[in-house]
Image: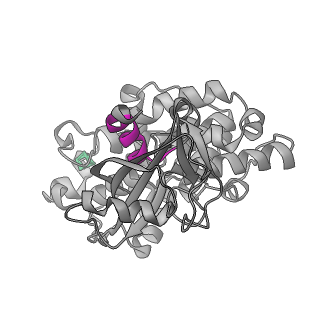
Amino acid sequence: MVINSEEAHFFRERLLAWHVEHQRPLPWKGERDPYKVWLSEIILQQTRVEQGLPYYERLLAAYPTVEHLAQAPLDDVLKHWQGLGYYSRARNLHAAAQYIAFERGGVFPDTFEGLRALKGVGDYTAAAIASFAFNLPHAVLDGNVYRVLGRFFGIETPVNTPEARKRFSALAQQLLDPMRPGAYNQAIMDFGASQCRPRQPLCEQCPLAVRCVAFQQRRVEQLPRKNPPTPRQQRFFLYAVFQKGRSVWMQQRPMGDIWANLYEFALWETEGLPEEPAPLAPQVAARFFAEASSLSFHGVLGPYRQTLSHRVVHALFYVFQMSVDEELLAPSQPLDQRAVTAQWIPVEEVEKRIAMPKIIAQFWREKALSCR
Ligand code: SF4
């Protein structure tokens, strides 16, 4: 789709004028320090501004420079990230910080390609950092931009297809203001978030309405189009929570699966959750502690549920207490052999020191109080 220069001028000038009046003051707006821009963009990749803001402030206070972040242990970074989800972002952030600090002397790449090569940085994030920090002419393409362009130009191509990616990205690049790429990118994202929003867009007060195809043809509710998502995979976790005195057994999840490096209890993954969970307790315990004589069952809690981008995890927590005199120091077979580390952890340290998946943190905070 090729648009003429008059149409592009109309679109970008109205958008920029709207932004002068309506922009939201946020700590990273107008920021030129690539470290701060990068940090904010990684946080906002799958997170709403309201949720991400306190994390941005806390992470920046803990790691004021890329060197501070690079030198921090990964477990500490994951702990600061806890609650934000999509933990691969934190692992990539840490790996990229180490690359920038230790292999580039703390100097950020200042080209789109250099930024795109950083771990965890895709096309969108590279364009955002390139335009905000270095004023380079690269248009961002996120859900907001798809929606604004899809409606304004009346584009029928479903946005979650490779064809749409090519089409919208070429269009976004044509519309970009080459002299003010950072301001333009910020304007179109803010416009999508607060004016041309997914539901109940403010069309009656919209500066683009006069030429907006969706508005003029009464198709705002139908655009942009999207193919139905593929169903999420269902996973079923039976956790055995072993306590011994004031310690609890936890293992670090392996790479190559959800929640890599986060801590969990001894896990038995099954094909489904039992209809009657409690009678299964001896089998759960036997999977890990065949010989433990002092093990006593304290109850089963759940089911808990956590929805991820492509999966839904259902979990039950079987709580067991063993005598402090029990000689067995660690669960035996078949604890996940791929686990990175496994250890007895004092209960006081669990919340302070350990990064856990949301479902485990929720169990630990809400329901395990009586077990501590
Ligand atoms: S008129 Fe409505 S649908 Fe069109 S750009 Fe404006 S807010 Fe979006």
Give percent across and percent down for residue 100. 78, 46
- Decide which of 270, 139 is in the foreground and name it: 270
**Residue lying at 58% horizontally and 58% vertically, measured from the top left:** 122
Residue drawn 36% across and 28% down?
Answer: 22
| Viewer-side residue, 192 vs 228 | 228
For residue 247, what is the image quadrant?
A: top right
Point out the image quarter for the C terminus.
Answer: top left
Instruction: Determine if residue 203 is in view.
Output: yes
Residue stretch in magenta: 356-368
Residue 12 position, x and y percent, is: 43, 45
Secondary structure, magenta segment, majority class: helix
Nearer the observer, 322 or 232? 322
> Does residue 75 appear left or right of residue 286 in this picture?
right
| Image quadrant in which the N terminus is located | bottom left
On screen, residue 259 above or below 321? below
Instruction: Please tell me which residue is depicted at 34% across the width and 32% down the height of the picture.
Output: 370
